[in-house]
Image (cartoon, helix red, strand yellow):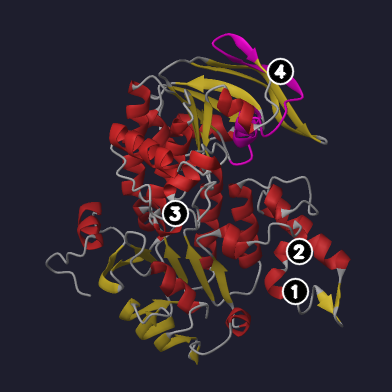
Amino acid sequence: MTLELRGITKRFGSLVANDQISLTVKEGEIHALLGENGAGKSTLMNVLYGLYTADEGEILLDGVPQHFEGPGDAMAAGIGMVHQHFMLIPVFTVAENVMLGHESTGFAGSLDLEAARERVREISARFGFHVDPDRVVETLPVGVQQRVEIIKALSRDARVLVFDEPTAVLTPQETDELMAIMRQLKESGTSIVFISHKLREVREIADRITVIRRGAVVGEASPTATNAELAALMVGRPVELTVQKRPAEPGPDALVVKDLQVLDETGHIHVDGISFSIAAGEVLGVAGVQGNGQTELTEALLGLQHHVRGSIELDGKQLVGRSVRKILDAGVGFIPEDRQVDGLVADFTLAENLMLNRSYRAPFVRFGTVHRKVLERFASEKLVEYDVRAAGIHATAGQLSGGNQQKVVVARELSRDLRLLVAAQPTRGVDVGSIEFIHKQVIVTRDAGVPVLVVSTELDEIAALSDRIMVLYRGRIVGIVPADTPREVLGLMMAGERPEGIVA
């Protein structure tokens, strides 16, 4: 099926999210849509999927104009969408999620779950998904949940599949598996729109690339284009793709962790007796495949874990046993790995989100009353300083793209007087322009004498930002090594091996 968009324009008040966008996706083609966060990529696809109605322009499938009143019409026409944030019911089984909204019935009107199970088995076998139709979705790894989303779309005979930032929540291994699946879909004749801002992935998988910037198409590019060329086309200026930093000038140890153990409610150990330190003015990167204790470590530092043993000292003061508020007041900044769950309140304005961890004291609150002028001036300055693309300080956080949401979190945390910065997946789901900006802010924080802990599943990011790298495997430290340690050695350590000469 050939998809054609002609002159699509979508406005939200005075904001033009899509401005006369035209593109064609051929049958059996992977067409990448590349652009910064907030460029209008997801808005355009939501128009295609019937979630929004275009103010101007038309959608054609095999040359026939389409008029979608909602996603049901788009699905009926053969369009499927795999969203960045999965549209699954966690407590339902795979089969129940697949049939949701398209329920078939059997005897006496009962749901024909067996038909849904068989459809899941058939599609899984065809593409090698290995998905159990009776597994409850919330028990599945993220990569498998994404396969469930793909099965949902294919079960409704989708001939055009839209992947909206599909790798934002995946590990590198899961990303490779998704790429293989996309190639299989292409070979079966499915047309694919791949929305991303990750240059390596786009160059690896796309047949053609359309770049949009600030809501408009600025050009087409070949997958043979260099990262620098694609980045410049996306952002509208040359982008520094490597982190520029001078050698660290570490001071005395500021954060000292000894024999730290973190358990869950069942007694399972997630962090198993680790000890390390971070000096003032140093970045310690934490590498490892996700699920090896990184999340529990960062949450223990913030007082978010309730079953913690051992010692965490910041500037000689014990943090274990303190409340989250007291730890924040001690000068700990926190960029969480999931900005939507732990970093922002979607229904609050940007101004309100920027004062969240200081909403009970000066300068924003006096005598129990919010000082509106102070807050609005502060918020306006931060939106400009951190290049947050939004309609204004009174827009809600939920209205922003993922990258702009991340910049709001970074702006809030780095605008305080910090004694420690904990940054977990600081650039997850963020475009190259924003990555460049956030990386600079981390280095500026380090150079101001603040100890920084960075956790990332992106080895390139860890190597670029860190002065030393600590590798975790199953909750234990495999070793702490210099930042210039070869990727091959780090890869072995991430698999639990300790090469000769590496000391835990």
Amino acid tagged 3: Val
SS assignment at label 1: loop
Seen in the picture, residue 143 relative to 294 is either above or below; the reply is: above
Residue farthest along the top direction in this orientation = 63
Tag on residue 137? 3
SS assignment at label 4: strand
Question: Which is in the foreground here, disc 3 or disc 1?
Answer: 3
Which numbered mark, 3 or 4, is in the foreground of this view? 3
- Is residue 61 a member of the stretch shown in magenta? yes
- The circle drawn on residue 57 is 4
Residue 7, x across and y down, in percent: 68, 17
Amino acid type, mark 1: Ser
- Which of pointers 3 and 1 lies earlier in the amino acid sequence? 3
**Image vertical order of residue 27 relative to residue 238, above or below:** above
215 to the left or right of 439: right
* In the image, residue 61 above or below residue 378: above
- Circle 1 crowding by C-alpha within 10 Å: few under 14, some 14–19, many from 20: some
At horizontal 53% and vertical 59% (from top left) the residue drawn is 338
Range covered by the magenta-colored residues: 37-65
Q: Position of residue 401 (x, y in %)?
A: 63, 45
**Would you call the spot at circle 3 few (<14 residues within 10 Å), some (14-19), or many (20 or more)?**
many
Relative horizontal placement of residue 382, taking residue 2 as reference (left or right): right
Residue in the image at 44% along x and 37% along y? 150
On the image, numbered disc 2 is attached to which residue?
A: 352
| Residue depth check, mark 1 versus mark 4: number of the one nearer the observer | 4
SS at circle 3: helix
Q: Residue furthest left?
A: 500
Disc with the residue nearer the chain's start (1 vs 4): 4
Q: Nearer the viewer, residue 270 or 377?
A: 270
* Lower position in the chain sequence, tag 3 or tag 2: 3
